[in-house]
Amino acid sequence: MQVPAPFEYQRVSTVTEAVTLLDRLGDTARLVAGGHSLIPMMKLRLTNFEYLIDINELHDELGYIRSEPGPDGAPGRIRIGAMTRHRELLESDELAAAFPIFRDAERVIADPVVRNRGTLGGSLCQSDPSEDLSAVCTTLDASCVIQGLDGQRVVSMDEFHQGPYETAVGDAEILTEVRFPVRPRGSSAYEKVERRAGDWAVVSAGAGVWLDESGLVEDARVGLAAVGPNTAGIPGIADALRGQRPTEELYARAGDIAAESCSPVTDRRGSAEYKRHLARELTVRVLRRAVARATGQEV
Ligand SMILES: Cc1cc2nc3c(=O)[nH]c(=O)nc-3n(C[C@H](O)[C@H](O)[C@H](O)COP(=O)(O)OP(=O)(O)OC[C@H]3O[C@@H](n4cnc5c(N)ncnc54)[C@H](O)[C@@H]3O)c2cc1C
């Protein structure tokens, strides 16, 4: 049986306690949330820390999904606490109504055991290029709230992911919240190809599409997972789609851009060529489904 190297274990019950302890222990310590990425890596001895700081008691403070209206009834935003678990994201009807992409993605992330413990914050901070929730957050143009001893800062997803397994969160900081702008006349969708149920993605894609009052594309975003160093947003797709009427030809053009923009590698999940083909096909499908949802035509 694989076991991690010895480590000290400490539980904390407030964000302030967590960052104070992180500040004292520096890079010898790591937070553990659901533990479904960190503990397997420690068991495999891919990583090791002298101290683990368990933040599960922060679920009271950081486990929430909250809608906030904008000023004067304008569309607002949804704020999700970093300790919100996969299962809570899957089961939230409020979240599925605003962003159906979450339920699409959560249905195909791992299995109920992992979903009961794994968190939004842990998923983003793991920064695995195949992480589904990172692709969802990229698609929805989320921003991340990072807390340190001296206060908070807010960064975009582009700034948050700095490379595979690297984020903007410093040694003495914690991700506390992820914020999603809500925009009118829009919807979203997610699709994943996996080798077997519950596996990591061979490739997955998310799309968000917002239409103007005449039905033309006002904005569109596509996020892909498992075909680059991080879950990539593809600005070229937004540029190609804005101001256009959504059609099969337009989705095909976006699919071509996705295939050209990604950088898959051949591994045991498939060849680079196959993954590029999937990036194209999944982009077409999620755009088609997001538009069908935005126009009330999903079958
Ligand atoms: C069998 C299996 C299958 C899986 N399949 C999939 C899949 O199909 N798709 C998918 O996307 N994921 C999959 N996962 C990963 C799963 O979603 C994890 O739950 C997730 O990656 C990490 O969340 P966690 O809360 O468990 O994080 P942890 O393992 O607790 O932490 C991960 C990293 O994030 C850091 N961290 C955690 N929370 C914070 C915070 N608030 N602030 C700063 N740093 C923090 C930790 O220090 C650690 O470095 C799978 C996992 C397993 C075990």
Image (cartoon, rainbow, N blue to C red):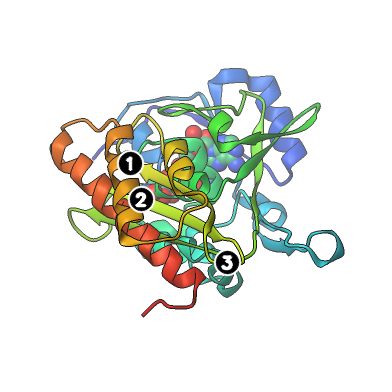
Of the image marks 3 and 2, the number of the one nearer the N terminus: 2
Q: Residue at x 66, y 53 (%)?
A: 181
Q: Residue at x 19, y 45 (%)?
A: 277
Apparent side of residue 296 relative to residue 180 in the rendered image (left or right): left
Residue 291 appears in the figure? yes
Q: Which mark is residue 178?
A: none
- Pointer 2: what residue? 205
Secondary structure, mark 1, is helix
Q: Quadrant of the C terminus?
A: bottom left
Above or below: residue 273 compared with residue 114:
above
Secondary structure, mark 3, is loop
The amino acid pointed to by label 3 is: Ser
Above or below: residue 243 compared with residue 260:
below
Q: Quadrant of the N terminus?
A: top left
Separation (CA) of disc 3 from disc 2: 27 Å
The amino acid pointed to by label 2 is: Ala
- Pointer 1: what residue? 258
Please rate how many residues cluster around mark 2, counting C-alpha atoms within 10 Å: few if below 14, some from 14 to 19, many from 20.
many
Q: Which mark is residue 214?
A: 3
Q: Position of residue 253 (x, y in %)?
A: 31, 47
| Between 61 and 70, the one nearer to me in the picture | 70
